[in-house]
Amino acid sequence: MTVSIEQMKFCHVDAVAEIEQKVYQTPWTKHAFINEILDNGFASYYVALAEGEVIGYGGIWVVLDEAHLTNLAVSPGWQGKGIGKALLAHLIREAAGKGARRMTLEVRVSNLRAQELYKKFGFVSCGIRPKYYHDEDALIMWLAELKCD
Ligand SMILES: CC(C)(COP(=O)(O)OP(=O)(O)OC[C@H]1O[C@@H](n2cnc3c(N)ncnc32)[C@H](O)[C@@H]1OP(=O)(O)O)[C@@H](O)C(=O)NCCC(=O)NCCS
């Protein structure tokens, strides 16, 4: 099975929002994704596709030399197969290509699986944002130097 990664387009948004509903307690709406891809000049979003089916997605904002990872998710049936790693590597490459020198993100303190993925790429924990998710604190992570492993 060949998996490709390409820029998120309007035609992908229904499938993206469906995955979003499945994987997050407080999912973004379809309109949030539409605004991001159509109206936010700082944002870049990508989808992972397997034979045309959206199986994962992720996005970044790049402002000057800083990138912010805003979202990263893989469809439940496709998790644990390296798709998250491939998407994150792609996002880091894209951010570096747009001039970012470091990257930050927030992740639920309980989301150890995602934290493990981020650590693999060199992200380190740099603090806590209390109640960032209303029901839970966020761990703030930073990747000090963008490179792709
Ligand atoms: C977090 C997420 C994006 C990872 O994507 P994935 O495709 O499942 O991950 P991969 O198969 O690429 O694995 C990457 C790494 O994640 C970690 N990981 C994957 N599955 C894991 C599990 N069951 N338990 C612990 N760590 C796990 C490992 O470090 C793994 O690296 P390894 O394969 O070298 O051991 C995915 O699980 C997901 O969509 N989760 C729900 C949404 C979410 O939490 N997003 C992050 C928000 S900050």
Image (spheres, grey):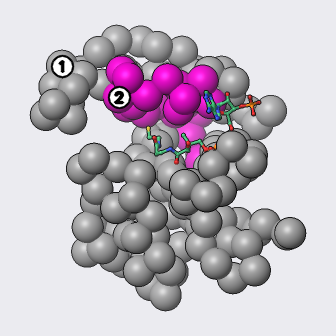
The residue at the point 76 percent across, 36 percent down is 148
- Rendered location of residue 142, percent (x, y): 49, 23
Residue 89 in view in this figure: no
Question: Would you say the beta carbon of the disc 2 residue lies within 8 angstroms of ligand 1?
Answer: yes
* Position of the N terminus by quadrant: bottom right
The residue at the point 45 percent across, 70 percent down is 16
State the residue in front, 99 or 90: 90
Examine the rendered structure and indicate whether residue 48 appears above or below residue 14.
above
Q: Say which residue label 1 marks.
A: 130
* Position of the C terminus by quadrant: top right
* Quadrant in which residue 134 is drawn: top left
- Rendered location of residue 107, percent (x, y): 39, 30
Q: Which mark is residue 108?
A: 2
Give how far apart the Cα atoms at labels 1 and 2 are: 10 Å
* Quadrant in which residue 22 is drawn: bottom left
Q: Which mark is residue 16?
A: none
Q: Residue furthest front?
A: 77
Q: Residue furthest bottom?
A: 11
Q: Is the residue marked by circle 1 packed among few (<14), some (14-19), or many (20+) residues within 10 Å?
A: few
- Relative placement, left or right, of 110 versus 25 is right
- Queried whether the magenta region covers residue 122, the answer comes back as no
Taking the image in four quarters, ligand 1 sits in the one at: top right
The residue at the point 74 percent across, 48 percent down is 81
- Point out the stretch of residues depicted in magenta: 94-118
- Queried whether the magenta region covers residue 109, the answer comes back as yes
Give the SS element for disc 2: strand
Give the SS element for disc 1: loop
- Rendered location of residue 115, percent (x, y): 52, 25
Examine the rendered structure and indicate whether residue 107 appears above or below residue 14.
above
Examine the rendered structure and indicate whether residue 68 appears above or below residue 132.
below
